[in-house]
Image: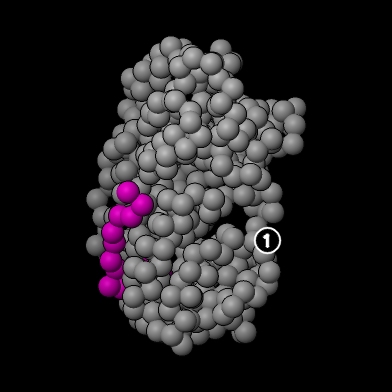
Amino acid sequence: MIECPCCRERIERRVVYRKERCPAMNNVTYRTAAEAVKAPVGEVELVACDKCAAVFNSAFDPDILEYDRHYDNSRDSSPAYRDYLDELASKVGKDIRKDARILEVGCGNGDFLKKLCDRTHARGFGYDRAYTGDGVQGSVIFRKEYFSPSAADSGYDVLILRHVLEHLHKPYLFLKQICRPSVLAKGAKICVEVPDLEWIVRKEAFYDITYEHCNYFCRKSLAALISSAGFRDIRISNVFGGEYILLEAVYDPTACKDAMSGRPEASGIDLGNVLKGIKRERDDFIRSAENLCVWGASGKGVLFLSALNDELLKRVKYVVDINEKKQGRFLPVSAKRIEPPAVLRKATGKIDVLVMNSVYKKEIEGALSGMGINAKAHIL
Ligand SMILES: [Zn+2]
């Protein structure tokens, strides 16, 4: 038996998906290949809660991870991602007043919070240990630390948690620490974005199952978790091409129940089946390619490469990324060197580019033709 970190019920420890030697951090790159090979790894043993439908890594050890300044998950070099953030800020910002105080926990480089405050004229407070910019930017104050509720931090009207809950070992306890009357104003809005497990399963995107993410939510399990933390009027939609769940709700501590009401049915996802057939198809494709390039040296690319054996890994001739800070560095476990896209000019013969996320396919095809490189882009 094991305690579910979302609903805290005792459940049977039935592993539905297992992955060994998973790179512990997807977004850390290394100076040398020797360091990259020795990157920390962890075990993934996913358990599905039959009470609240949450899926979590029961073998997760938070001590393996360290989110500090070496952690670079910024995708701001991508125009497609910047467009997405603009669109999201406009959607989320619609009902935010200009005198509102917005708290973002896990704000990364602060791009979204800045966009949201620019749009709404509200004041922003961003917390992230990996934040590297200036402390004050316009109407936004950034703190390079974990958020901890104190007397000075109170009365927030909006709480933003983008890509945070899936990283937390104990998401319910985390929410209970922040979502209390001494921190949030009554009627405060919460806005949560997480990857959608149902999308991962539907797309057979098993590269999205990563050590960094110890929780995998579907709409039902996310709604159950947020309502148990004292929120009502939950609205859920899918964003970013369907890949993420966006949840918006209203804080009402009187609505808070210790036991969850209206418990959802377990989602019944059979992750074990996700892998069937895909692996052989993938291996054949890699072997048949003349010049194979993996485009995108973050989450999906790292996991894709670290799952390959040495023979297949050698077949991947190039790993490219437009993020200049990553170029010349090495990926964890696979120890592949990250190159700028222009490296493909050196290739002779047919070039196949594996696009790690379909959202970026058009952008990558545009970049290839802009450089005069004749290559075929494939979606992974
Ligand atoms: Zn549960």
Foreground pick, 19 / 348: 348
Instruction: Assess whether residue 237 is covered by the magenta stretch.
Output: yes
- Residue type pointed to by label 1: Thr
Foreground pick, 275 / 177: 275
Q: Where is residue 212 in the image (x, y as percent from the top left)?
A: 54, 45
Q: Is residue 86 placed above or below 346 in the rendered structure?
A: below
Q: Is residue 300 placed above or below 287 in the rendered structure?
A: below
Q: In which quarter of the image is the N terminus?
A: top left
The span shown in magenta is: 226-241
249 sits to left or right of 368: left
Q: Image point 32% across, 43% down: which residue? A: 199
Q: Where is residue 38 in the image (x, y as percent from the top left)?
A: 71, 30
Q: Image point 45% across, 45% down: which residue? A: 56
Residue farthest bottom in this picture: 99
For mark 1, what is the residue? 132
Q: How is the image coloured?
A: one colour
